[in-house]
Amino acid sequence: MPRSLKKSFDYLAKAEKLIPSLTQTFSKAPYTFVKGVYPVYADRGKGSHIFDVDGNEYIDYLCGLGPVILGYCYPAVDNAVRKQLEKGMTFSLPHPLEIEVAEALKRTVPCAEMAKYSKTGSDVVTAAIRGARAITKRDKIAYCGSGGVWHDWYTIITTRNQGVPESVRKEIATFEYNNIETLQKIFEDNPDGVAAVCMEATMFEPPKANFLQKVKELTHRNGAVLIFDEIVTGYRFSVGGGQKLYGVEPDIACLGKGMANGMPIGAVVGKSEYMHIFDDVFFSTTFAGETLSLAASLATINEIDDKNVPDYIWRLGTKLMQGYNAIAKEKNLDVISCIGYPVRMRIICKDEKGNDSLLIKSLLLQEMVKRGIFIQPSVQYISYTHTEQDVNKTLEAFEESLHIVGKALESGNTKKYLEGEPAKPVFAPKPSS
């Protein structure tokens, strides 16, 4: 297990003088892992593995925060990018790939009759919000999800809301997944005022008691637009995303992470009657039609569809998830469990009072990364190039790591076993008014 992280720390020292927050994405910042034990900078990836700048190799379950659904350096995607690179990246006219990707989206995503592109998930979700407001002539947004959108309309309800006008707060209200009464109350409190219900089709628990159907009925009964944020679930939970898995079509859906295997692209898709609002709504960016990402997206969607990638990652993820829970149970560590879905799982660590413990989780992550397993505190993903061997090695590392965690818990001084700094969350949601 001996590793050197010298180059990572050397780069970190330079970044402290050059890059605010040390990263372009908060979720990749060193403080979100176990600072001092985790690598800070990646050098390359291949398949399901990444290599840090010091040459250390890890089985990666973060997958670039989710976009790397097929695996790093996946030949079909990389070859499509290389082929398009020889022709050019950005042009003075639209490119036929815009149509080809829209056709692939229409073929695979139930609600996708039309499509508009951008470069990030935040952009396309915000575009969907703007479109819904234009359609309904209303302002209020009812929201349910794990966040991650950096635009004002959402950021105002997080702890990272500096620079956002306080007046924005009144235009968003949150409701609880699988609790239809909380959405009903938003409509009751805002008669004829809700423009859209924007939600993740599924989070870390499945919909219960026809929840999604009830959301759709309630939304339409009140004259609002139903938006599914499928940035994470699209092409991962099924070829057609969460809407296909659960049989509920939204009016508009937002896609991103799973549609280009790591290349920067997002899409707003939906029924034509809703999507035509973008004939007039200002949603226009120079790089939305950049062809390398479109070529990657077309290749990725075709691979996912042709090879039924979701079926594979469900099966392998199930083995990993069940293995985690079986080992924890065997070691009588009921404070540790794995929840969610095999394609989007999360390890939970509880303290003696039953509260989530980042300290215990940090120790677990520390021991896993020392054994060549790269996981993140809040989520784990499986890619198409993860293998049975990867999972077996991961479960061996988990068992060894739980031995250390068990000793720490028995000692009553978990912090003593920690070699770095405990992980910290990116932000905590604030309740809306």
Image (cartoon, helix red, strand yellow):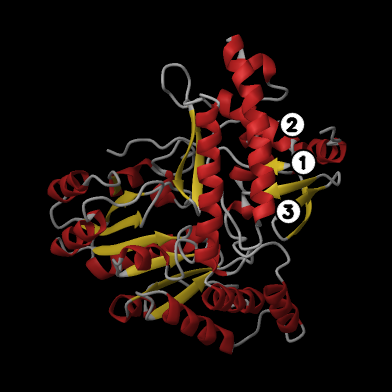
Q: Is residue 34 among what the camera can see?
A: no
Q: How many marks?
A: 3
Mark 1 closeness class: few <14, some 14–19, many ≥20 residues within 10 Å? some
Circle 1 sits on which residue? 15
Q: Which mark is residue 170?
A: none
Q: Which mark is residue 49?
A: 3
Circle 2 sits on which residue? 37
Residue 115 vs residue 386: left or right?
left
Q: Nearer the viewer, mark 3 or mark 1?
A: 3
Q: Nearer the viewer, mark 1 or mark 2?
A: 2
Residue 191 vs residue 7: left or right?
left
Looking at marks 3 and 2 on the same chain, the residue that comes earlier in the sequence is marked by: 2
Residue 275 x %, y %: 35, 77
Q: CA distance from mark 1 to mark 2?
A: 18 Å
SS at badge 2: loop
Residue 109 x %, y %: 41, 74
Q: CA distance from mark 3 to mark 1?
A: 25 Å
- Name the image quarter holding residue 155: top left
Residue depicted at x 55% and y 39%: 324
Towards the viewer: 15 or 394: 394
Q: Give above or below for 293 relative to 245.
A: below
Looking at marks 3 and 1 on the same chain, the residue that comes earlier in the sequence is marked by: 1
Q: CA distance from mark 3 to mark 2?
A: 18 Å
- Name the image quarter holding residue 4: top right
Residue depicted at x 26% and y 65%: 225
Mark 3 closeness class: few <14, some 14–19, many ≥20 residues within 10 Å? many
Q: Amino acid at mark 2?
A: Val
Q: Quadrant of the C terminus?
A: top left
Residue 367 vs residue 338: left or right?
right
Looking at marks 1 and 2 on the same chain, the residue that comes earlier in the sequence is marked by: 1
